Image (cartoon, rainbow, N blue to C red):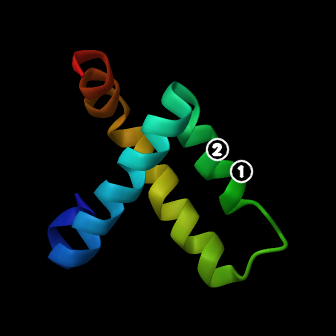
């Protein structure tokens, strides 16, 4: 829902990043992103970035997995 209020360049970049993680980690991509979001060695800004990507990856999991299986 909040993607309606996002800038187009951010949405495109996030989709690209999420696609990379699904290509690399498959079904585990949201888990990997969540782990990065909880990494205390990262700045709060970086953790917010990874948290946003993890949330989007969980919401779009079926879309990305369908793309991977059709490729």
Residue 6 placement, left or right of 20: left
Which quarter of the figure is the N terminus placed in?
A: bottom left
User: Residue 25 location, x and y as percent?
Assistant: 56, 34
Distance from the alpha carbon under mark 2 to that under mark 1: 5 Å
Q: Dot 2, how many residues are within 10 Å of its Cα: few (below 14), some (14-19), or many (20+)? A: some
Is any atom of residue 56 visible in this view? no
Helix, strand or loop for disc 1? helix
Q: Dot 1, how many residues are within 10 Å of its Cα: few (below 14), some (14-19), or many (20+)? A: some
Query: Which of the 4 quarters of the picture holds residue 9?
Result: bottom left
Q: Looking at the image, how many numbered discs can be counted on the residues?
A: 2
From the image, tell me which residue sits under label 2: 32
Q: Which mark is residue 35?
A: 1
Image point 34% across, 62% down: which residue? 14
Is any atom of residue 58 visible in this view? yes
Image point 57% across, 72% down: which residue? 48
Label 2–label 1 contact, CB within 8 A: yes
Image point 20% across, 79% down: which residue? 7
Which quarter of the figure is the C terminus placed in?
A: top left
User: Residue 22 location, x and y as percent?
Assistant: 44, 38
User: Residue 27 location, x and y as percent?
Assistant: 51, 26
């Amino acid at each position: 829902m909040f993607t309606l209020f996002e800038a187009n360049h951010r949405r495109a970049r996030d989709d690209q990043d999420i696609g990379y993680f699904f290509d690399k980690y498959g079904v585990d991509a949201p888990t990997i992103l969540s782990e990065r979001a909880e990494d205390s060695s990262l700045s709060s800004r970086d953790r917010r970035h990874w948290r946003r990507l993890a949330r989007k990856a969980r919401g779009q999991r079926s879309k990305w997995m369908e793309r991977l299986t059709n490729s």
